[in-house]
Image (cartoon, coloured by chain):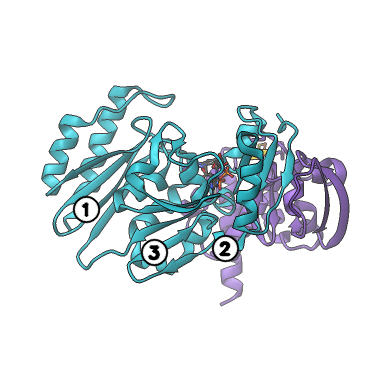
Chain colours: A cyan, B purple
Amino acid sequence: MKAPRFAYARPASIAEAIALLDKHKDDARVLAGGQSLVPMLNFRVAAPKVLVDINRISALAGIKIAKAHVRIGALTRHAEIERSADVAKHLPLVAAAMPHIAHPAIRNRGTFGGSCALADPAAELPACALALGATFVVAGKKGERRIAAGDFFKGLYATALKPGELLVAAEFPLPRPGDTSAFGELARRHGDYAMVGVAAHGSGKSVRAAFFGVGDRPEVFEADTVDGLLSKVETDLEPRADLHASAATKLHLAKVLAGRVLKQLIA
Amino acid sequence: MSAPLETVEIALIVNGERVKRSVPARLNLADFLRHELELTGTHVGCEHGVCGACTVRVDGEIVRSCLMFAAQADGCKVDTIEGLSDSREIEELQSAFVLTNALQCGFCTPGVLMAAQALLRDEPNPSRERIREYLSGNYCRCTGYQAIVDAIEAVAKARAARSK
Ligand SMILES: Cc1cc2nc3c(=O)[nH]c(=O)nc-3n(C[C@H](O)[C@H](O)[C@H](O)COP(=O)(O)OP(=O)(O)OC[C@H]3O[C@@H](n4cnc5c(N)ncnc54)[C@H](O)[C@@H]3O)c2cc1C
Ligand code: FES
Ligand code: FES
């Protein structure tokens, strides 16, 4: 099907975008890469009156290294993150996740911020943000605020973003020497959303793993050791069934994946 | 531009030619190319990004034209299968597809050629595995993919042999 009628606006700055979102309130929707929103429009599961196209706001795009973090702008395309030498060096977990996100033509348009704002429970980037303890930077009429990844993802397609707010960037803490990370997912076909996946990060003191495709949002486990983490997963992980698999199948797959992926943290 | 509009004026370059139109905001790029410019080589299968039949190039990178609005292509350079064919950019791929029977009904072919050309531009010597992975977003309901991979591999090898 085709998208329903809407009015299109293309602000040139963050301030202009926020003013438009504030003016049109619930009638407005941000259009980033459109790789999820346009299908939703075509299926008529969304019918905003106004689309605020942020694609020409250059301040929202790009990857920057600061003293303590790597900042990924909301409008940074998946393809740019995939190619980034800085991401490969400082955020190997994110680099490992990128090729699993959809297909090349979709990664050329889809954005980091779009993935996080959408909060699909089977998406890779929210799990990476949780595993790495990223902080989201959000802007609204009253200025900027920062939200820890752990407080950002609220449930099925639900985040801490308030109406009228724009996701601006995420800040990932720079890794310390000796940190390790590992990523894996099981999907029926390359590029499909994961049936089950896991993004994991280990420092000298603790290990953290975010499972995705298991419930209404990624589920995070933490422990002092990899063995401790594996036994927590063994007893506490309770995936929900979805269109792709029963709960029992998901649990089996998650455990197989946990064994394969989490052990890489030790090496 | 800032006030929301239901009809948008756009100026873009399609296959090297300047185009100016006034379009409904809801018109997607695939339909704009097909119905407004009569470039029907861009096919529309699923209209939600899954099949790849609508793949075109915008500013040099392949994208799904069913997931972009024509209004968003304002100021962009768009290349369709007609453009790539006329410029002979994909001549070798076209011949290899014919030789290996890499198309039957041809519905997927324009999108597959777009993707294959993008792959070979960035990675001149991909493995069969990599070709399959790269084309994972292009559905073909006829060929079973084997011949498509054969054709792309053959072109990569021929180019590599020539550049030695
Ligand atoms: C065939 C196909 C396969 C896919 N497979 C995967 C996959 O395996 N894994 C995966 O993670 N994704 C997958 N995707 C989705 C893709 O990654 C999308 O790019 C992503 O989910 C949304 O990003 P976008 O930039 O396209 O956002 P859009 O579609 O433009 O927007 C998505 C939502 O986020 C909101 N939004 C976007 N940006 C902002 C912002 N800066 N501030 C506030 N709100 C904002 C929009 O209003 C909308 O509600 C797939 C898509 C397709 C079509
Ligand atoms: S029609 Fe665009 S991907 Fe199927
Ligand atoms: S040749 Fe018929 S869909 Fe590919």
| Callout in the foreground (3, 2) | 2
Question: Considering the image in quadrants, where does the N terminus of chain A appear?
Answer: top right
- Identify the secondary structure beneath mark 3: strand
Disc 3: CA contacts within 10 A as few (<14), some (14-19) or many (>=20): many
3 and 2 marks on the same chain: yes
Horizontal side of residue B47 vs A60, given as left or right? right
Dot 1 falls on which chain?
Answer: A
Q: State the residue in front, B74 or A243.
A: B74
Mark 3 vs ligand 1: CB below 8 Å? no
* Circle number at residue A70: 3
Q: Is mark 2 on a helix, strand or loop?
A: helix
Q: Which residue is drawn at 87% across and 47% down?
A: B22
User: Which residue is tagged 2?
Assistant: A59
As rendered, which of A251 and A6 lies closer to the eye?
Answer: A6
Closest to the observer, A40 or A198 = A40
Q: Which three-letter amino acid code belongs to the residue tagged 2?
A: Ala
Q: Badge 1 is on which residue?
A: A264
Q: Which residue reaches farthest bottom?
A: B164
Q: Residue at x 23, y 59 (%)?
A: A180
Distance (Cα) linking label 3 and label 1: 24 Å
Upstream in the sequence, badge 3 or badge 1? 3
Residue B99 left/right relative to A95: right
Ligand 3 occupies quarter: top right
